[in-house]
Amino acid sequence: MAATVHRRRRKHPVPVARILVLGFFLILMFGPLYWVAITSIKPSDDFLAVPPVWFPAHPTLMHYTAAMFSYRGLQALTNSLIISTAATILSALLGTPMAYSLARFNTGGQHLAFWVLSQRFLPPIAVVLPIFLIYRRIGLNDTHIGLIVAYTVFTLPVTVWMMFAYFRQMPKSLEEAALVDGCSRWGALWKVAVPLAAPGIVAAAVFAFIACWTEFFFALILTSRNAFTLPTVFRSFLGFQGAQFGESAALSIVSLLPSIALGVLAQRHLVRGLTLGAVRG
Amino acid sequence: MADVKIRRLHKRFGTVSAVRGIDLEIKDGEFAVLVGPSGCGKSTLLRTIAGLEDVSNGEIEIGGEVVNDIRPCDRDVAMVFQDYALYPHMTAGANIAFGLKARKMPKAEIEARVKRAAMMLSITQLLDRYPRQLSGGQRQRVAIGRAIVRNPQLFLFDEPLSNLDAQLRDGMRGEIKRLHQEISTTMIYVTHDQIEAMTLADRIVLMRDGAIEQQGAPLDLFERPATRFVAGFLGSPQMSFLRGKLVRDGAGDRIRLDGDGSALPLPRERKLDGTSDGMAVLLGLRPEHVTRAQGSPREGFVRTEAMIELIQPTGSRSYATFRLGGEPVVAELQAHDVSRPGEKIAIDINLRRASLFDARSERAI
Amino acid sequence: MAEELWTSEMAESISAGVITARVPRRRTFSEWSDRHFKWLLVAPASLLILALSVYPLLFSIWVSFVNYDFTVPGHAFIGLKNFSQVVFDGNARWSLIVTAILSFSDVTIEFFLGLALALVMARSFKGRGLIMSILIIPLFISPVIVGQTWTLLLQRPWGPTDFLLGRLLGHEVTVSWLTSTPWNFFAIIIADVWQWTPFMFVILLAGLTAIPPHIYEAAELDGVGAWRTFWFITVPHLAPMMLLAITFRLLDAIKLFDTIFIMTGGGPGTSTYSASYYLYTIGFAQFHLSQATAGSWIFLILTAGVIALLVRRLLRAEPS
């Protein structure tokens, strides 16, 4: 009798702990997001209400229009889209061949690999200051191209390392068959290796895109009226006047939806992306 | 169609020598099999011929042309890989046509060749399928089709049957042999399986530790092995080896077994050049030369009584293990022989066909 | 396998093919590029990194030794003056302390929370995939938005935080989360922890799931209790992953800028200046660019050791 009671008790506590912990985290996570979401549709009067309004009686979309137009959110959105997409494409175009070379030929040994990988950890302030000065001299400040190029370099380490890990676990024999069949090394790369690595390339591209989409510091320094990206628009909301809550919330929602959607879609490759391929998810 | 000449070939990976000083000549149209235990360098040698590995020293000549600096795609060789290496994102037909497309052959010609190769290998109905939809045997045929369709001057096979199960392997082996009979292109085939080597080869090249141990026609290596290694590698079940000393006093040449001192008289015909009295030797006995005693003792045979320790029936015959001079020997018995372990039977040992090796150098006497 | 018809045709095409199948050896661009293939592949990316990372860093060395200041004309060589200005600036030293406090607090809290989450999510259960997708959401949000969101929540008097806390604790709560020390530190930490705990969680979970289950089964059969199992089996197996996660996260945390920029603006005064924020104000608010550059080099050198260690550890993890 005592034995069965004991055994039954052993099995119970685990799910309870799980439910409690997960519940706690989920509330903690959703809470802020929920608040932002409803703030974005609250009529302005509700902002100043005490106690706070948990769900607006008369939701409105006017903050979205204000954010997009008065605060030039739409222009920022377009810029972000252009710049992030271009940088992502460039990053994939340059990073994939490099990753292939490192994976198949161990090019440059430890040194090249070390150098590329360490780029990921450089403090942005150390890099962006001189780039700012250089751009000033050659007129690339506040241009799309300027930021695109900077973002390409900024995302290269992660792209290279994700693809490196991916190529490593692809068997060589397919490329060798292509070589014997009649392809030059380039042919083997583009006709066989790259098509097979497509899922990895897409995943790396997704993370590169998210990195560019959410990046603030470089954009802050290297852009102003012309090429400004979504994160930089939040500068205008500094020094809260209360009246801007709705717009800032609306802009937040507009900005975070795409990156969250992409991130969740690519989550299978998340661990590899976060740890630069050091860990297989 | 071309001959292959390899001169003083060395291949090193860092400090490790995978291939040491190989000299090999394969005639036009020959089916050469590179065989040996894992790590002997046979695959490495094949890959240097294909151009997938660079050469550290030496020369490779295909069809009269030194190809050391020529890229794989320009060497006009075709290769069949162990894991088939079919492009998974292309159909079987596209796989086969791949090499031809890479060489910019006209579309009509490509289609014609693919169709012919598919007919030859009975895979016409599979051309539209993807590799993942094919069985192992079918994939291997597609891989072979990809090689055939290019009409290369040289075919290379890297353990193509290792990934197939035993029954499929037997069938494919026959088909590869037939393929060679029909298109008589020079073929170099790598395997670790000595049965494949024996059945397929015009010439066997037995390798060990990066060097060639012996090469020649299969039956040559089987019946006249140059070293103990070759003798032990070919033939299944393996040759039994007994240690002993050669006795060459006036009273007839014989071997005194180390195990129990018993002596086995050697037939007069056996040439014993370069041997001396008291020399340590190895006596090699193949199961087919150790059989159930029948009739009266024959010239050159030794009759002895054997206590069976183990019986291994294979269906067509049975193999009995007993001790001679204290060491195990395998005898071949008829399938219907109902001897059991623990029984004593009379055994005839054919010392005419037995192999003799210098125990120190392991070379044949 | 063969058909008579095929054999003769095949033989014909063989003899024809001997002439055409052999590709003549060409000293072409294709051969040249194949020979230098591996270098050609890394060239474009390397050039870009050289141009936009190495060159700027070298350039900045020069900048840090001259006078490069939008408020003062000329680029005269001034030796170590920039460096000493930074080193003797109280704000600089304070910003290092702030950086240390914030990053260590961040990483510690994130680690324990992430570990708790990972332990709870380690075993498969219904709906785990969905919950997983939800839990990782903060990773894909821009840090400024995260900062903005928590500003919305924490600011007085219209944010719901004080109200909720008041209800929870029974008496009125009037904490100025963003404008008074030490609450502003908490605010920044909360925002960061909210965003980056999933990072720890994901990595630690990957480490947990990599532990072979039969080790736990053996322990269970041996009658080892839950706490001992955790301490003597889970932790040792997880240790390398823990170290990786912590180092990674720490290196990112010390660059803290976005949340500070948007939540406190470094204030009140200079109380929440992180190292990056401090250098930013020197360079882009005061335009003492060479001083900021000198400062960022000091910062870089301070972190270089840890960076090198982490990178080497990551490289070793690759089977070469």
Image: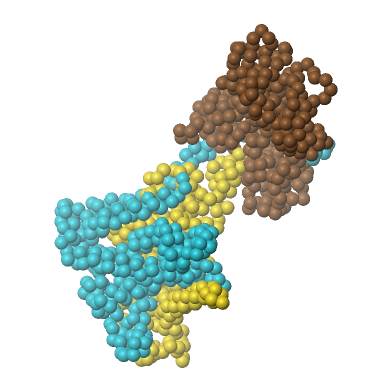
Q: Classify residue A152 as left or right of residue B66.
A: left
Is residue B142 in view? no
Of B55 and B35, nearer the camera is: B35
Is residue C260 in view? yes
Question: Whole-percent x and y of residue C166?
Answer: 34, 88
Q: Which residue is drawn at 22% across and 55% down?
A: C64
Q: Classify residue C274 as left or right of residue B159.
A: left
Q: Residue at x 44, y 43 (%)?
A: A107
Where the C terminus of chain B falls, by quadrant?
Answer: top right
Question: Whole-percent x and y of residue C275?
Answer: 26, 64
- Above or below, B13 relative to C214: above
Question: Whole-percent x and y of residue C36?
Answer: 47, 39
- Label tally: 0
Of C295 and C115, nearer the camera is: C115
Q: Colour of chain B?
A: brown
Of A3 and C239, nearer the camera is: A3
Where the N terminus of chain B falls, by quadrant?
Answer: top right
Q: Classify residue C60 as left or right of residue A167.
A: left
Q: Residue at x 51, y 39 (%)?
A: C34
| Image quadrant where residue B289 sits | top right
Q: How is the image coloured?
A: by chain
Of B269 and A70, nearer the camera is: B269
Q: Which residue is drawn at 19% across and 61% down?
A: C86
Q: Colour of chain A?
A: yellow
Q: Classify residue B175 as left or right of residue C53.
A: right
Please give the letter of the chain rendered in cyan: C
Question: Whole-percent x and y of residue A48?
Answer: 35, 89
- Above or below, C84 relative to A103: below
